Structure formats: C-alpha cells, structure tokens
Amino acid sequence: MASTKWETALAKKIASMPSTTKTAAAFKAKYGSFLNKYHGGMPIGLMCAIAALESGGQMLAGDPSYGEYGFFQIAEHTEDAFRLPRGFRKTPTHNIFLAGLEYNIAARRLSLKYPDVVIDGSMDAWLLARMSFVFGDNGTNICIQKAITHGSVSRGAVTAGILKWADDTGAIKIGGSEAGKIWYRLHTITDVTLPIANAIGGSAGTPLLPPAPSGVKYTLPKDIRGKIAAGANPLLVAALAAAAFIWV
C-alpha cells in the first residue's frame, strides 16, 4: 500500500467525483459535436472525464516545461510529432482532435506491443492509453512489465493486474515521481476516471484515426503508419444516409 499521504490524496479525489462528473457532463453538452467527430474508437465518456480532470473542461495552460494547453493538456511536442504548426492545439476544435488522435494511436500501439494480453478496442486498452498519457510510454511499459512479472496480468485485464502489483508492492519510483505518487495516479485512473467515464456513457471501440479538421494535414509517426484504420466522418455518414433516404 501507499503512504497515508497518498491514500488521503486519493480519498479527496474520490470525494470530489460528484463535482467532477458534473463538469464532465457539461463538457459533453457543450462540445458533443466535436467529440462525436473526433473520438475515433475512444469512449466519449472517457474523453469527457479526462477533460474534466485535466483542465476542469477549460482551455488553459498547464505545465510550462511541456507547453501543455487546453482541455486535454496537449503538450507542445505533440504538434511536432504530427508535423503541425506551433499553437495548433490552442483552439477547442484542434485540442479535441489532437486528444482523439493521440489516445487512439496510444491504444493501438499498446495492443500491437502486447497482443497476448491487451484486447484491441477494450476499455482495458483505453485505460492503458490513458496511463500512457499520465506516465508516458516508457512509464506505462514499466508498469505492464512489472505486473506481468508479478503474475497479476490476465488477457483483457492488464489495468487490474497493474493495480494489483501496485497494491501488493507499493509500486516503484518512475522518473521524478515517487512510488506513492505512482500508486495514487494508478488508482486515480481506475477509481476516479473510469467511474466518471461510465457515468457519462459511451462505448469502447477499435482505435481509429479521427478525420482531420477541414484544411488540416498531418503526418503520422512511422511506427503506426498502416497499422490503424481511418474512421469515417460522422457528419459525412449522416449526409450520405440522408441522401440515400431521399433517393429511395
């Protein structure tokens, strides 16, 4: 178990869930059209929960060392990774698009890296994608490997296995974060983020590339090219369906 300090911090986070859930619901009500367009296969409820927890659903600056900004605290280097202009993440539309793009790619990468235990498109995979945002790819891989070695991982339940490892061992220091903080952040994903996501709703689906906003071109990192399908633009699908109805 973690120290009392981190147990107390988690208890406070859980106690604030009703307020955070209201923030997530308000975010969905205001930006639902963008979320529907750019979520790919990610549960919309999970996107709303993350936005509420990361920024209170506000377009504001975060950690200056990463240049984080917006609803999803998108880092400046994300723009570089997709060869987008600096400042691209600073509009609501582009911030939501980049969140959808990042999380769908993260979920797909994890199912490709751990095909024996990560089920593509499962909520477990999406929680692991969230973990990759919180801890980075390297930190997430460390957690997965530790849990596998610990013997607590089963297919489709990797997140639960990581949590059991952290509870049994107290976790470990990763980067500049002490072990207790790692334990706290893992529990925040499962004990706070997930319940809020479930309360907002939205099903988990196979990772897909969200359609780019009008006039936007970006470049995928080499490791994921050809390994993730492009999602359909829901507005175009609706238009085609309407046209088909008219001509029947």
Image: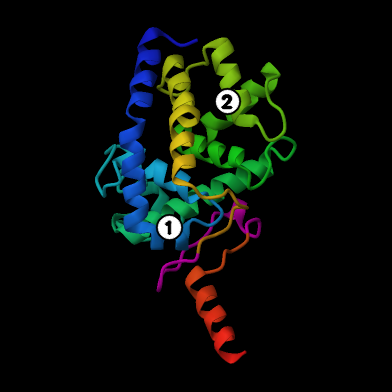
Q: Secondary structure at mark 2?
A: helix
Residue sitting farthest toward the bottom:
247
Q: x%, y% of residue 149?
A: 69, 19
Q: x%, y% of residue 25?
A: 36, 47
Q: Is residue 218 visible?
A: yes
**Are there few (<14), some (14-19), or many (20+) residues within 10 Å of tag 1?**
many
For disc 1, the marked residue is 35
Instruction: Tell me: 53 left or right of 166.
Output: left
Residue 33 sits in quarter = bottom left
Which segment did they paint magenta?
Answer: 211-228
For disc 2, the marked residue is 143
**Residue type highlighted by circle 1:** Leu
Q: State the residue at coordinates (33%, 21%).
A: 12
Q: Is residue 71 visible?
A: no
Q: Is residue 64 above or below residue 74?
A: above
Of the 4 image quadrants, the one containing the C terminus is bottom right
Between residue 151 and residue 23, name the one nearer to us.
23
Q: Is residue 214 magenta?
A: yes
Between residue 203 and residue 121, name the one nearer to us.
203
**Are there few (<14), some (14-19), or many (20+) residues within 10 Å of tag 2?**
many
Q: State the residue at coordinates (47%, 53%).
A: 100
Q: x%, y% of residue 80?
A: 41, 53
The secondary structure making up most of the magenta span is: loop
Q: State the residue at coordinates (69%, 37%).
A: 114
Q: CA distance from mark 2 to mark 1?
A: 30 Å
